[in-house]
Amino acid sequence: MLLSLSIENYALIHSLQITFNEGFTAVTGETGAGKSIILGAMGLLVGQRADTQVLSDKEHKCVIEAVFDVGKLGLKPFFDANDLDYDDNVVVRREILPSAKSRAFISDTPVSLQLMRDFGAKVLDIHSQNQTLTLLDADFQMRFVDSMAGNADLLQRYTDIYRKYVSTKSELARLSAELQQSRRDKDYNQFLFDELENAKLTENEQEELEQELDLLNHTETIKQTFGEVLETADRQDDAAVPRLLSAKSQLSKITAYYPQVEELFHRLDSCVIELRDIFSELASLDENLTYSFERQQYVSQRLDTIYNLQSKHAVSTVAELLEIKSQLSDKLLATNNLAERISALEHSLSQYEEALRKLASELSAKRRNCAQQIEKEVIPILSDLGMKDAQLALEFTVSDSFLPNGTDSVRLLFNANKGGELREVGKVISGGELSRLMLALKSLIVRVNMLPTLIFDEIDTGVSGAIAAKMANIMKQMSQKAQVLAITHLPQVAAKADCQYKVFKQSDDTSTQTSMCRLTDQQRVEEIAKMLSSEKLTSSAVEAAKELMN
């Protein structure tokens, strides 16, 4: 139940605070007074989108807040599931900032618009003039039947399995296509893998082989250089080492007379030792360096193998070839695993199909049984609303495949004239008849299901007189089980309400504002009298208003 509504800086509303009672409430006002603005503000509380165009003052944010009594709706599991603080009185707030950002809150906790929509659907049912057209939609018709049949739990079980069924079917199709492609590629992948496997590559092999081949290709030059260096070092009469030894001997003769030379003598001695060590290592390298034509051929062929593999796979390192080999191994292994995974998915899919068939059959049976009851109960209501010859039927067809809500499709067939042919409701119904039919169907839902606050936005459009009074009676009856707010232009509807609000505009030299107030009993009489007499308050209109209200 909607307890209160507060609106700040929204369209023509600068500031508005309204409280509501249970039962039947009428909202009236002149055309253009701003009733649609009130409805639009409420729409934001159930997650409708908005932009900065709704801001009356572009420098400040718009705030719309409502308090709902949800104590009888059993919503604590919803709050627990969404980590929200629960209280019987829940505060819902929507803010539209000048930056065009929007914020939503439930119990002072920030929430997404989708969560606000989910909550809004549980506490507020807004029937706008446009929503009447949803009666022509097959999905709405099926939801109505399911609501009347009490299929919520059964439909939830079906939906949960259907999601798994669709997901499994999609995965199965993907893996089956992958398996077919994998089998087509298997021989080629196996050839590539075997080629890399037989190559027996190691990660640093290429660099080592390239260095070795470079050495083998230049062995002759290296050995020739070694020979020449060693010849000049120690094997000739004027070689470096003998000459340094001679110089060392000469210096040793004068160190006793010229002490400053002693340090140079020792440094020269160190040079001789270092040179002998260098030439010794050169001799060792020369001795150990051997040339093998067979080894040169092997290294060259091995590198050719590596280069050819790199060219084939468009890479430049052995590490990349090893990674490709690993990927090929995974693909070959995956081909074998795919068949096992597909088999497991086919088994799961078969189980889902069996469960869906059973649930769909239960849904179909309950829908058909309920359809007969709907047809039986709606006809008297339509007759009471001035369509005495109306006929209504629900026609079901069964699909060979599973649908999101079962295997059924439904068509609402209607005819308002005696002896006429039943046809799809959208092809044979007028606007006024459509509104009355929608009201009749909603009145049935209220009988069997706990509905939240219902708001009817001029559902009485296109009717007048006695029919309007009948529609008002139905809304009055609905208000025994749900809070009903009716935005109306008809005095017959306003008169049946338990209380009445008036929406009006106020203007000054600089601005126009929309406001809303609750009418006293006397004000209600005067307001309804004006509605009866086209704004002119006459004594006869006042008496007629009192009679309507009584």
Image: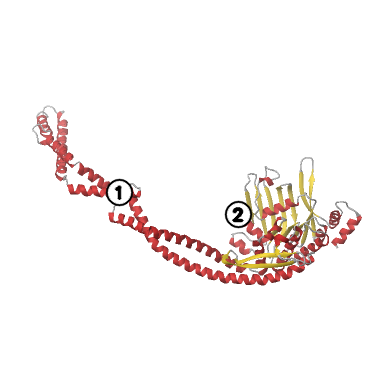
x and y, in percent, of residue 451 in the image: 69, 64
> Which of 352 and 429 lies nearest the eye of the viewer?
429
Q: Residue drawn at (85%, 61%), measured in percent from left and top?
A: 548
Please state which amino acid type lies under the numbered disc 1: Asn
| Residue at the extreme top | 258
x and y, in percent, of residue 328 in the image: 36, 56
Q: Earlier in the sequence, mark 2 or mark 1?
A: 2
**Residue 167 visible at all:** yes
Q: Residues within 10 Å of mark 1 (few under 14, many from 20)?
A: few
Q: Secondary structure at mark 1?
A: helix
x and y, in percent, of residue 505 in the image: 79, 47
Give me the C-alpha separation between circle 2 and circle 1. Answer: 58 Å
Residue 38, placed above or below residue 452 = above
Q: Are marks 2 and 1 in contact (CB under 8 Å)?
A: no
Q: Secondary structure at mark 2?
A: loop
Q: Can you tell which mark lies on residue 112?
A: 2
Q: Residue drawn at (29%, 49%), measured in percent from left and top?
A: 306
The number of numbered badges drawn on the structure is 2
> Which of 97 and 383 lies nearest the eye of the viewer?
383
x and y, in percent, of residue 290 in the image: 16, 45
Q: Residue drawn at (15%, 42%), measured in percent from left and top?
A: 286
Circle 1 sits on which residue?
308
Q: Is residue 68 left or right of residue 277?
A: right
Locate the C terminus by quadrant.
Answer: bottom right
Q: Is residue 387 left or right of residue 95?
A: right
Locate the N terminus by quadrant.
Answer: bottom right
Q: Residue drawn at (23%, 48%), measured in percent from left and top?
A: 299
Please state which amino acid type lies under the numbered disc 2: Ser
